[in-house]
Image (cartoon, rainbow, N blue to C red):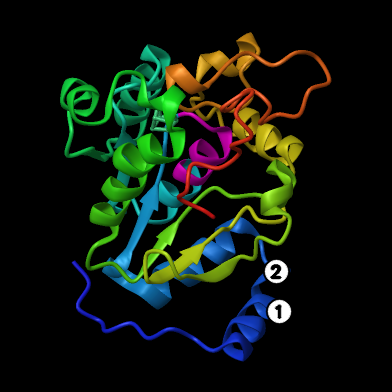
Amino acid sequence: MATEQIVEPTQEELDALNAELSSRTPQEILRWAMDRFGDGLILACSFGGISGMALLDMAVKLKPDIDIFYLDTDFLFPETYRTRDRAVEKYGIRPVAFKSRYTPEEQAQEFGDELWRSNPDQCCALRKVEPNRRALEGRTAWIAGLRRDQASTRRDVQPVSWDRKFGLYKISPLAYWTEKDVWRYIFANDVPYNPLHDQGYPSLGCTYCTRRVAEGEDSRAGRWSGTGKIECGLHK
Ligand code: SF4
């Protein structure tokens, strides 16, 4: 576990880093982050998105014992757990699950039935944001699969940023990759991916808040459909 005291960088420091890293490959960015942050670095992989799976493959090839976590909201698709199991088998990894302090039953009792309908922001805060905070405790940087082409809210993603919400660096090695780039990597490297992507689910989260998308729809249109919500609160 990290012991380094991390200090928020200035905007100039971040700009200089990104000017240097934005022309590098994702693997080079990962290598830089591993050298810079050592054991303070942790990889987030949801076993839902293709970006996370590509990053997992790259990261494990560079550092087989890299620390990995995922958020188990208790509402994941069975296919997501199966993708996790396939990754465990293929890479020999030991991803750590972080769960809400509330079981689904306790959440219903305390905050009402179907909180994902009545107040999805609160539901995500309880089942994603708070466990994510615990997962990042004592860390100096985390790696996430954000890409600029995923959503309008992600258009400015940089390879390195300061994550104010959680108080550490956030590394996004795929910031400049497109969905096509990720698929190309997945097929070229035989990376396991969630089979629901082949069944009309380009973006996956919890069962209650993910629907199939129609041909031509935005890839994240199936997340929190009809609520106006587009992010779970981890990245915005
Ligand atoms: S995605 Fe939906 S079910 Fe999952 S934590 Fe957020 S609101 Fe709750």
Q: Around disc 1, counting alpha carbons within 10 Å, would you say few (fewer than 14), some (14 to 19), or many (20 or more)?
A: few
The boundaries of the magenta stretch are: 48-56
Mark 1: which amino acid?
Ala
Q: Around disc 2, counting alpha carbons within 10 Å, would you say few (fewer than 14), some (14 to 19), or many (20 or more)?
A: some
Give residue 230's quadrant in the image. top right
- Indicate whether 44 appears above or below 223: below
Residue found farthest to the top: 199
- Indicate whether 198 appears above or below 49: above
- Indicate whether 103 appears above or below 144: above
- Is 88 placed left or right of 230 in the picture? left
On the rendering, which quadrant does ligand 1 occupy? top left
What residue would you read off at disc 2?
A: 22
Q: Position of residue 228 (x, y in %)?
A: 64, 34
What residue would you read off at disc 1?
A: 19
* Residue 59 seen by the camera: yes
Q: Position of residue 56 (x, y in %)?
A: 45, 43
Q: Position of residue 186 (x, y in %)?
A: 60, 32
Which residue is pictured at 28% across the width and 39% down the height? 93
**Answer yes or no: do the residues labelled 1 and 2 have beta carbons within 8 Å?**
yes
- Indicate whether 124 appears above or below 135: above
Prevalent SS, magenta region: helix
Question: Helix, strand or loop at disc 2?
Answer: loop
Figure quadrant of the C terminus: bottom right
Label 1 CB, ligand 1: below 8 Å?
no
